[in-house]
Amino acid sequence: MGYLDALRNITIADIKVDLMRTAYDNDDALLNKFDPRIVIIWSAIFVVVPWFFYEPEPLFVMLVASLLLAYLSKTSIYLLGLLIWGSLSNIGFIVILSSVVYWWQGGSGGLRGAVVDNSVALLPFTMKLTVISIVSLAAFSAMSPKKLAKGMLGLGIPRPLTFAIAYGYRMMPVLLEEYHDLVNSLRLRNKAPENRGLLRWRYYLYLLKLSIEAFYPMAFNVAKRSRVTVEAMETKGFSHSLGDEDSRRLRLGSLEILPRDVTFMLVSLLFVVVVAVFL
Amino acid sequence: MSTSKIIVDDLTFRYPGSDEPVLRNANVEIGSEEFTAIIGGNGSGKTTLCKAFNGLIPHFFNGTFEGTVSVNDTVTTESDVSALSRTVGYVFQDFENQLVQPIVRDDVAFAAKNHGLEDYQTRAMDALEAVGLGDAADRFIWELSGGQQHLVALAGVLAMEPEFIVVDEPAAQLDPHNARETYEQLRTIQRDTEVGVIVIEHHTEFIADYCDRLAMVVDGDVAWTEPVDVGLNRVEELLAADIHPPQVTQMARQLPEGHGTLPSGRYPVTVEQAVDAFPTVASTGGRRATPDGSGTGERLIRVEDVTHGYPTLREGRKTVLDSLDLELHAGDRVALVGANGAGKSTLLRLLTGLESPDDGVVTVLGNDTNETLPEETVYIHQNPEEMFVEETVREDVAYYFENRDDPDVDTRVDDVIEFLDLEELADRDGRLLSIGQQRRASLAIGLATDPTVVLLDEPTGSLDLQSRREVTRMLSRSATRTETVVVATHDLQLVAEWADRVVVLGPGGILADETPRSMFEQPELLAQAHLRPPQVVEVSDRLGIDPPALTTSGIVDRLPTQEGR
């Protein structure tokens, strides 16, 4: 029961802090040091690159590289875990289903052989998906909200959208707090199952039910909050700023591409070329 | 320096879709050389009036608008909200939702940047310095306390160098200590920069201490504007609008003719004035020893050597409660007081079993909360909105029974609703009620479960007089249904009137655990816990009434008058 207890002791508070760290605490993150426009373009390139490789070896090298990058960018371990669990369970399901069908149809090699064959066949695909997910997660979680919004504005994305991103980051902790409170409020009024079942599955199912139930009231409370925000935005001259050249210039002021940004881009591309040629 | 003026001339306004106008032929003139307070009962139209100053009405809420509002030479209908906001800044009551950027400095500079002002950075820093938050410029908004967030919202407004600042109910969302800080800041800003400050407020004690002029809004019209001393003496009119005059003014009224008035013939409105006006008392002898308030009833809750904290982003785990021991008994009416961050809410959450202590044991009704959620305990959230999960109050009250397949849900729900006089609210959505109604409804949700222990977090926060009275009455009534009630609060008037045991939490743990009376006898203790005694206690202290009186009638009985005594 040792590790299950450890799992139980991950509190919502810990997850909250970890998510916040991913979103905000990026001063030391590798990808936060570059010009945001470069990072956005860079991640766009690396979402495409893995699809040009078909052999497991280069993909594996890329997977390792992207994990290293995620580590240097201080990506949330929970998010990373969730992501990897997602791809594995997804692919795992396909493997099992296809193998059972294959075996049922009387394919040679039996069930075991089918599982092995199918896993190997799907391996490159799994790795491609995992690489692009990790790369984009690392890129977007490493940039501070301000930088991300600035970079997108610099690339010509309309201001209402870039503002929405900065605002989303501002609201995230508030939402987490609110959600946590609502789940607690429900827990206090519900009845936990007395018979918890094997590995407490009934209990976890019960918690899952509550956590879904808490969404609707949260959406409602958020809508209520935003009424004041919209009024306040008006008093802060947001709509004035949409057509104002001076305002746009001020907001983009400090963006410039430095030699290190170019170096970063070149080194990454070189890495791909090396992988492509030698593996 | 020339002063600016806001002139409202014969203003009538009706919100779209409503039949009754909110403002009817309102007239008022406000100058920037004064600190003006606007008061009025709930729904009298004071917020609507203030939103007309910066053009939110009629530009943002387009209803039926007649009359004119002008700020200096600008008529609001001929300008727009962005432009007007540069002259008239607005700090909303829900100031948290006014902060739209993650980092303090960016939020304060937001408006200046939107207007394309080159010096936005200096403006932001100057504004932050002006409110005393220069050090917090690079922090995240959500890391700040409520009081600090309010000051950030204020700084955001100051950065535009306005001529007027409107602050909507600063004391409603802030604890008394922070509200006082905010008022100090506003007073300084008004004196030093001659920015006109307008507050919407119903705490007359703040008005008496900080404001110059008082404007009373009744039924959508400004009934009168008077200097504060004169205005707060119109006690009958204030009470008719559910506004509490300062406690000292109420005391003075209860004293026989000629005993509680100032030389001018008016009632005092501040403690200073009261001390001058009231007859002095000969010392009533030494202090009486007072026993601590812990009851003799059966022990219901036991907190043993509990240490608890929460993880933070940058400073690791922060310990809030350190080796705390506490026992609560049946029949106790416990008030939990202390500065923000002293751990009041944390302690309540531990008692509910929602959180398990990092170290130590919490036992509620004989059960270790680490093992089971104590069923007999009810926790009423500081923010009542978090209690409403269904579409009507009735369904919310029934929720607990539905989950337990209780056969007579309806009778039990009806019983509670009737007990708390909530019939007219029962079929409305809890989240759309006023805050006072929400507090009462959330109490119903809690009491429906026939709990043994009731835990309330700030039950009287941001309530007006009427709602406050009702919540206090409900608290007293709920005593017949429960064994023990624990209230975390900043409201020392509530403590004085309701509690029989006070636990004062401080950074080092429990600072004191005693009766309210004995707590009020120790000004150092109150200061340590960031609390300010009610005016009765302060006046008692200044006049030498010992032990201090806790209610206005208590003090009136003790003051010597010519009718003898």
Image (spheres, coloured by chain):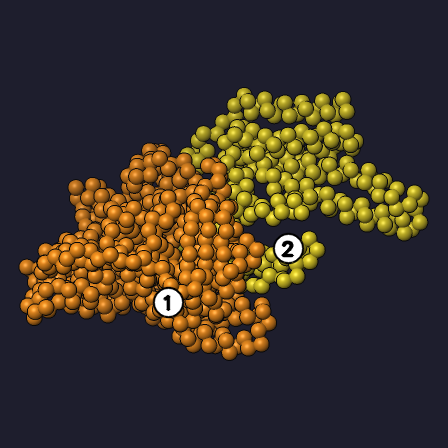
Q: Residue at x 64, y 25 (%)?
A: A268
Q: Which chain is yellow?
A: A
Give SS at disc 2. helix
| B531 and B362: which is toward the camera | B362
* Residue type highlighted by circle 1: Leu
Residue matched to label 2: A204
Colour chosen for chain B? orange
- Above or below, B563 against A211 in this view is below
In the figure, is residue B502 to the left or right of B545?
right
Q: Position of residue B170 (x, y in %)?
A: 31, 53
Q: Is residue B249 visible?
A: yes
The 10 Å Cα crowd at callout 2, few under 14, some 14 to 19, many 20 or more, is: some
Gap between marks 1 and 2, in whole Å?
36 Å
Q: Residue at x 50, y 51 (%)?
A: B361
Chain label for disc 1: B
In the figure, is residue B432 to the left or right of A101?
left
Q: Position of residue A200 (x, y in %)?
A: 66, 55
Give SS at disc 1. helix
Q: Position of residue B213 (x, y in %)?
A: 18, 55
Q: Residue at x 54, y 75 (%)?
A: B409
| B521 and B396: which is toward the camera | B521
Residue matched to label 1: B475
Total number of numbered labels? 2
Chain label for disc 2: A
- Above or below, B419 against B80 in this view is below
